[in-house]
């Protein structure tokens, strides 16, 4: 996702995360149902599949995510990637003082869709920062 690329590539000037998540390992456990490991072996296999995502986690890259302009946009009724994912990142950046270049836009009543308002927010953001 955009957050993973931003965290790992310092040449990215600014980022718009539209309905995204930077918490890949936890989201992988809920985003791909009905994958419910029924045995310890299945749980181990799933853990091994998800493990490489840990190095991309936002938690490990708050400094890189906060050192350039970042837009977080999310529909508050997202039915695929919960809005809590973006709200959690906003809180983490704020608590660590890395929210100076952060812009957040939350749209009530919107599910996992790019709306005209989302496009406007992204265009405005990129015009300002590119």
Image (cartoon, helix red, strand yellow):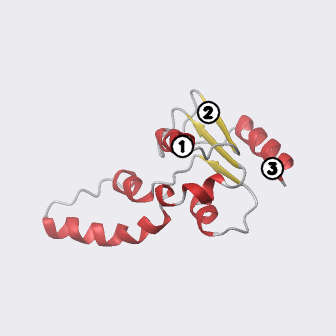
Q: Secondary structure at mark 3?
A: helix
Q: Quadrant of residue 125?
A: top right
Looking at the image, residue 82 lies above or below residue 64: above
Residue at label 2? 106
Q: Residues within 10 Å of mark 2 (few under 14, many from 20)?
A: some
| Mark 1–mark 3 distance (CA, rounded to whole Å) | 19 Å
Front-most of residues 25 and 118: 25
Q: Residues within 10 Å of mark 3 (few under 14, many from 20)?
A: some
Could you tell me residue 111's position as x and y percent? 54, 36
Please state, as top left, top right, bottom left or bottom right, where the C terminus lies in the image.
bottom right
Looking at the image, residue 92 lies above or below residue 68: above
Residue at label 1? 86
Front-most of residues 37 and 64: 64
Q: Secondary structure at mark 2?
A: strand
| For the residues bearing labels 1 and 2, Cβ distance under 8 angstroms | yes
| Mark 1–mark 2 distance (CA, rounded to whole Å) | 9 Å
Left or right, residue 83 beside residue 44: right
Q: Secondary structure at mark 1?
A: helix
Could you tell me residue 41's position as x and y percent? 16, 70
Residue at label 3? 126
């Amino acid at each position: 996702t955009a957050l993973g690329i931003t965290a790992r590539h310092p040449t990215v000037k600014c980022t718009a995360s539209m309905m995204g998540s930077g918490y890949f390992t936890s989201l992988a456990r809920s985003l791909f149902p009905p994958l419910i490991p029924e045995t310890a072996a299945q749980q181990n296999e799933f853990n091994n599949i998800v493990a490489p995502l840990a190095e991309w986690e936002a938690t490990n890259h708050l400094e890189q995510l906060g050192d350039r302009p970042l837009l977080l946009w999310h529909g508050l009724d997202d039915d695929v990637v919960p809005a809590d994912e973006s709200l959690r990142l906003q809180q983490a950046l704020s608590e660590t003082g890395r929210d100076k270049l952060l812009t957040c836009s939350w749209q009530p009543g919107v599910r996992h869709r790019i709306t005209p308002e989302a496009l406007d927010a992204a265009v405005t953001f990129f015009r300002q920062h590119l």
